[in-house]
Amino acid sequence: MTHPAPARLAGKRAYITGAAGGLGAAMAQLFARHGARVFLTDIDGDGAQAQAAAINAELGDTVAWAAAQNVRDEATWPTLLEQAAQAMGGLSVLVNNAGIGALGGVESLATKDWQRVMGVNVEAVYFGCKYALPWLKESQPGSIINISSMAAYKVDPDYTVYNASKAAVASLSKSVAIDCARQQLAIRCNSIHPAFIRTGIVEPFFQQLGEEEAIRKLTRGNPMRRLGEPDDVAYAALYLASDESRYVTAAELRVDGGASAV
């Protein structure tokens, strides 16, 4: 006889950016399967709607909602968070997952690419934390999960802006965590640091280098010699979203196949 998976997120209500595919979609699906209500956003609004519809169809209930969002647009954050809280009956988990990359060393990288990547990967995380906290305070205990990268501390000069942006996310996460803790709020903030995962963010490398050479380059120095899969990160996020991690804050959870250890 098979038993259903335990509802590790029963009663949780999660807002997930960058959820039209890749890590965001995997997290939304896994969270919903474990009892959470989920609100998916993405600059690809149709893609986010399709993911929400697939979750609702699988679970036979309306537990997922979606909206288009350009995370760089500060003005849309309060409106969308209010929309999400109204749909889900509150907000207890924020996942700042939306992210992009760009190739280039410090001299060759175009300034516009620096600004674009920092806008999505850092400014948007700041906006998310800033505008979600009032809602999280109303639904404590709460959890903020910011998707950083192994690149925060193991850099490749070809990915200058990506390295810098993900290091900023790690530091910002700690600042938010300690700020919440010193206010005696039951709101935690942690960052997840994957190695390269097989999602759309690696497509530019595949296109530029070819798949075989891209995988070789992206997994260079990784003891497991493979790209990660979206569920590898989704399960880490599931733990941080749940009350199982109630004493975990300001932490960096490395999901990198051991790459940061060598």
Image (cartoon, rainbow, N blue to C red):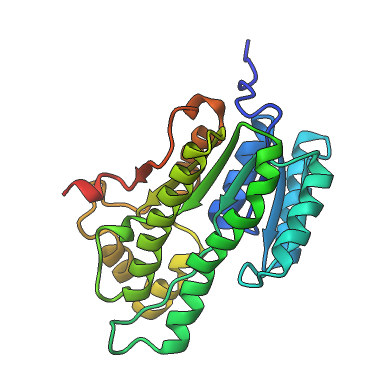
* Residue located 46% across and 73% down the image: 118
Q: In the image, is 35 to the left or to the right of 196?
A: right
**Which of the 4 quarters of the picture holds residue 214?**
bottom left
The total number of labels drawn is 0
Q: Nearer the viewer, residue 238 or 133?
A: 133
Q: Could you tell me residue 133's position as x and y percent?
A: 63, 48
Give percent across and percent down for residue 14. Answer: 66, 43
**35 lies left or right of 95:** right
Report the quarter where the N terminus lies: top right
Confirm whether residue 162 shows in the render: yes
Between 195 and 117, the residue placed more toward the observer is: 117
Task: In this rendered view, identify the residue nearer to me: 105 or 252.
Answer: 252
**Residue 61 x, y percent position in the rendering:** 83, 35
Task: Look at 50% across and 27% down and name the residue there.
Answer: 246
- Toward the left, the furthest residue is 262
Position of residue 13 relative to residue 70, above or below, is above
- Identified at 56% across, 65% down, the residue is 124
Specify the farthest residue to the front. 183
Is residue 43 shown above or below 153? Answer: below
For image coordinates 66% across by 72% down, the residue present is 73
Q: Quadrant of residue 165?
A: bottom left
Would you place residue 129 above or below residue 139 in this image? below
